[in-house]
Amino acid sequence: MILRRYGTSVQSVDPNFDSKAHTEIGFRRNHERSDPADEFTAAWERVDAHELVAETEGSVQDEVEGRALGDLEGQLRRLESGLGPGEVLVVENEQESDHPKTHTHPVAVENRLHFRITVRPALRVGVYRKRGGSG
C-alpha cells in the first residue's frame, strides 16, 4: 500500500503518472485507508528510505517523457510489491516545496531535436512499519 500525507491526514493513494497532465507525477486518493497524521506518526516508524529517479532520451518528446514516467512508476511498484508483512510505502516529498517534476532538455542533433527527460527532485518514499513490529 502507498500512503501520502494530505494536511492533517495520511491517506492511501494510487500513482497517477501522466505525461499530458499538468502535474505529471501525481497521486490519486483511493479511499482504502485514512489515518490522522499525528496518530500515524506516533504508531509507525520509518525502517527504510528510497530515492527514485528516472532519465530517458529520444526524438519524440511525449514518448520519451512517457518512458521516464513509466520507469519511475515501475520502480515504485517494485518497491510496493517487495514490502514485508505490515509494511507500507509513504511518499515523503512535500507537495508544494519539493514535488518531483519532469524536466526536458532539448538538444539539436543533426538538424533534429533530441530530448533528454529527467525527473527531479527524486521521488522520496519511506518504508514504514508499525512500532513494535505488528501490522
Image (tube, grey):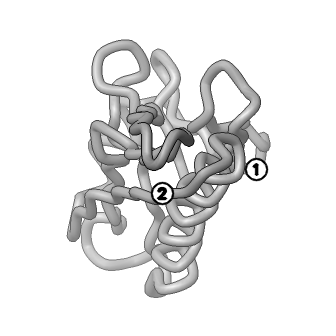
Residue 44 is drawn in which quadrant?
bottom left
Q: Report how far apart the C-alphas of labels 1 and 2 lie in the structure.
A: 36 Å
Residue 46 is drawn in which quadrant?
bottom left
| Placement of 86 over or under 33, stated as above or below | below
Residue at (42%, 32%) from the top-left corner?
103
Q: Circle 2 sits on which residue?
A: 57
Q: Circle 1 sits on which residue?
A: 32
Residue at (38%, 13%) from the top-left corner?
96
Q: Amino acid at mark 1?
A: Glu
Residue 80 at x, y percent in the picture:
53, 73
Please rate how many residues cluster around mark 1, counting C-alpha atoms within 10 Å: few if below 14, some from 14 to 19, many from 20.
few
| Placement of 132 over or under 112, stated as above or below | below
| Placement of 80 over or under 14, stated as above or below | below
Closer to the camera, 101 or 92? 101
Closer to the camera, 105 or 95? 105
In the displayed structure image, the side of residue 98 where residue 135 appears, left or right: right
Q: Quadrant of the N terminus?
A: bottom right
Residue 29 at x, y percent in the picture:
72, 36
Give the mark nearest the N terminus, 1 or 2: 1
Q: Amino acid at mark 2?
A: Glu
Closer to the camera, 71 or 111? 111
Q: Mark 1 or 2, which is nearer the eye?
A: 2
- Residue at the far front: name it: 110
Residue 104 at x, y percent in the picture:
45, 33
Residue at (44%, 86%) from the top-left corner?
84
Residue at (73%, 26%) from the top-left corner?
21
Please rate how many residues cluster around mark 2, counting C-alpha atoms within 10 Å: few if below 14, some from 14 to 19, many from 20.
some
Residue 37 at x, y percent in the picture:
41, 31
Q: Secondary structure at mark 2?
A: strand
Closer to the camera, 119 or 51? 119
**Count of numbered tags:** 2
